[in-house]
Amino acid sequence: MSSFSSPTALTVTGDPSDDGAGSFVHRLWGGRGEERLDILNLLSELTDPHKKAADMDDISALLAPLVDSTREKKAAADNHSEDMSEGFSVIETELRRAAQDLAAYERKLNPNPIATLQRIVLLAGLSVFMHASTRPFERAGLERRFLLLDASGEHFSPVAQASTRCVAQLIKDASEYLGIVISELLAQGYSNWEVDPIGAINVLLESVSQAPLDSRGKLARRIKDATSGAEDPQEIRREVCDELLREIEGNQRRGLDGYLRMLGIRSGFLYPLQKNPFKRLNPSDRTLEVLVMATVNVQLPPVEYRDFLDQFCDRWSIVVGGRAGDADLLAGGGANVPAKALRENSERFLDRLESLGLARRLADSVAVVGLLETTHV
């Protein structure tokens, strides 16, 4: 995300978090299996540092000599988690289809390499965001969350406020999910670890060759204070996990919730960009283009707007307000929006798609979404 200004593999960063996310995307797109998607072939072509200057775009042709002696980046180690260990889940399958649709769009459009690379990197970031934000649903059995795309253009409109609540609930679920994961890890050593939290923590630390917790240290004292007098096992588990999360995250919010917020901003998915903690779903133009073109099949005729909204929701868990059941989906997550406001939001969203060349209104109040102009970059 931080180095796509030039489609040259030698300019990619070596940040550990970038490596982890890149390794996940590589695995999601079939980089180490037989189900390799064409988007990886396209990405490889774009970032090949050894291609001839005649085949490069102007910027890469100028930059290539400057990084010609740079040591090539080695592939990140594969992270063997339970995700994708036995095939692809429903969410992962949708994300793979998104990659297939975007690759077909890029092949048909054939724009300048930098524009294509930007869209591929954006899709990778969005895929990481969607996968990470749905772990509470797919792995922990929490309720599936839907995000409301705010097209109202007003900071304090009912739609903007509801969109903010949807994002806040998603972030809250991510924090709760980390607590569930910590509890499950502690239970591997102690099935009833709430009886001796410090002992269970030390068993976990020793299993990964880490020093045990100092019983006189600050963390141990906080855990003892938080659980003293508590009799309910669930309350003890919750208090201990909360203390461990606070210790892990520190002041920088390095947990899953903070990561989602950061990635959503960098991907142009969440807004505002400033350090305002209250984010809502209002994607940038480039990000919206990626979301749309990673939803529709450009090999087929453009789809009707109402059908597109169904596909958009199925793939990205995003609602706009143009469907009969959208209000109920949002109400399930605690976001109540007047039906009129949702209808108006859907109309404004369609206006925005039309202004970007991604939709067109036809006769009889019918609108279609898809690739309408092959010159669009």
Image: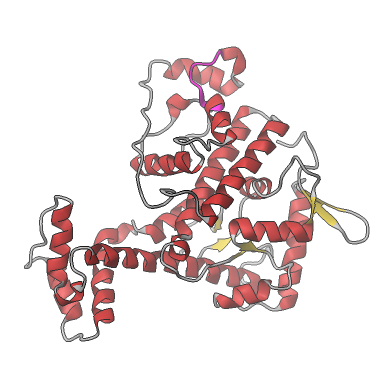
Q: Is residue 264 above or below residue 63?
A: below
User: Is 108 left or right of 131, judged from the image as shown?
Assistant: right
Does the stretch in magenta take in 48? yes
Q: Main secondary structure of the magenta part?
A: loop
Residue drawn at 57 percent across, 77 percent down: 332
Task: Give whichever of 159, 129 is nearer the camera.
Answer: 129
Task: Give whichever of 310, 337 is nearer the camera.
Answer: 310
Q: Is residue 58 above or below residue 147?
A: above
Q: Is residue 250 above or below residue 341?
A: above
Specify the quadrant of the image occupied by residue 100: top right
How many marks on residues? 0
List x then y, in percent, for residue 289: 67, 46
Q: Which residues are magenta?
A: 46-52
Q: Quadrant of the C terminus?
A: top right
Residue drawn at 61 percent across, 48 percent down: 287
Task: For residue 231, say whether it is visible.
Answer: yes
Does the stretch in magenta take in 328? no
User: Is 266 left or right of 292, judged from the image as shown?
Assistant: left
List x then y, in percent, for residue 201: 17, 64
Going by the picture, which residue comes out furthest to the left? 216
List x then y, in percent, for residue 244: 24, 65
Residue drawn at 53 percent across, 16 percent down: 51
